[in-house]
Image (cartoon, grey):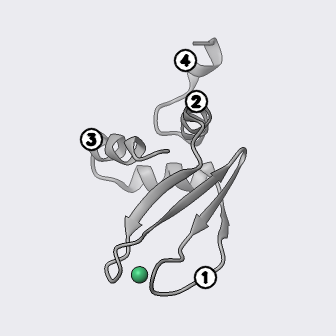
């Protein structure tokens, strides 16, 4: 672990970015659609992040997003347990 990695605060945008890179992740599900059960979430492509809201109910284009938006979403969760559970879905 480098000094830079140690300095990064857990659940920050930079931390999320490092986790994504370390895991070679391309997908972080947000939640499943209440109607069809298909997951919507964040598509990660290198340094770029998009929010994919399309599910079995309808198609919609991916929206530009960011590691900051993921960090803001994590910050909205009520407990670190939940944040950790979300990040375990990173793949
Ligand atoms: Zn749906």
Task: Tell me the mark number nearer the camera, choosing from 3 and 2.
Answer: 2
Q: Which mark is residue 6?
A: 4
Counting residues from the start of the chain, the first of labels 1 and 4 encountered is 4
Q: Which mark is residue 60?
A: 1
Quick check: is the Cβ at mark 2 less than 8 Å away from ligand 1? no
Q: Say which label, 3 or 2, has the lower sequence index.
A: 2
Rounded to the nearest angstrom, the CA distance separating label 3 from label 2 is 21 Å
Element on which disc 1 rests: loop
Label 3 sits on residue: 81
Q: Is residue 48 left or right of residue 3?
A: right
Image quarter for ligand 1:
bottom left
Say which label, 2 or 1, has the lower sequence index: 2
When the figure is inspected, residue 78 is found, relative to residue 4, above or below; the finding is: below
Identify the element where label 2 is drawn. helix
Task: Mark 3: give few (<14), some (14-19) or many (20+) Cα within 10 Å.
Answer: few
Q: Which residue is disc 2 drawn over?
A: 22
* CA distance separating discs 1 and 4: 38 Å
What's the CA distance linking mark 2 and mark 4? 14 Å
In-front residue for pair 80/91 = 91
């Amino acid at each position: 672990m480098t000094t830079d990695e140690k300095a990064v605060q857990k659940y920050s945008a930079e931390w999320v970015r490092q986790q994504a890179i370390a895991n070679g992740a391309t997908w972080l599900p947000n939640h499943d659609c209440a109607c069809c059960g298909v997951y919507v979430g964040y598509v990660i492509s290198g340094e770029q992040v998009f929010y994919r809201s399309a599910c079995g109910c309808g198609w919609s284009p991916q929206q530009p997003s960011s590691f900051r938006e993921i960090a803001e979403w994590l910050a909205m969760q009520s407990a670190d347990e939940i944040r950790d559970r979300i990040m375990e879905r990173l793949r």
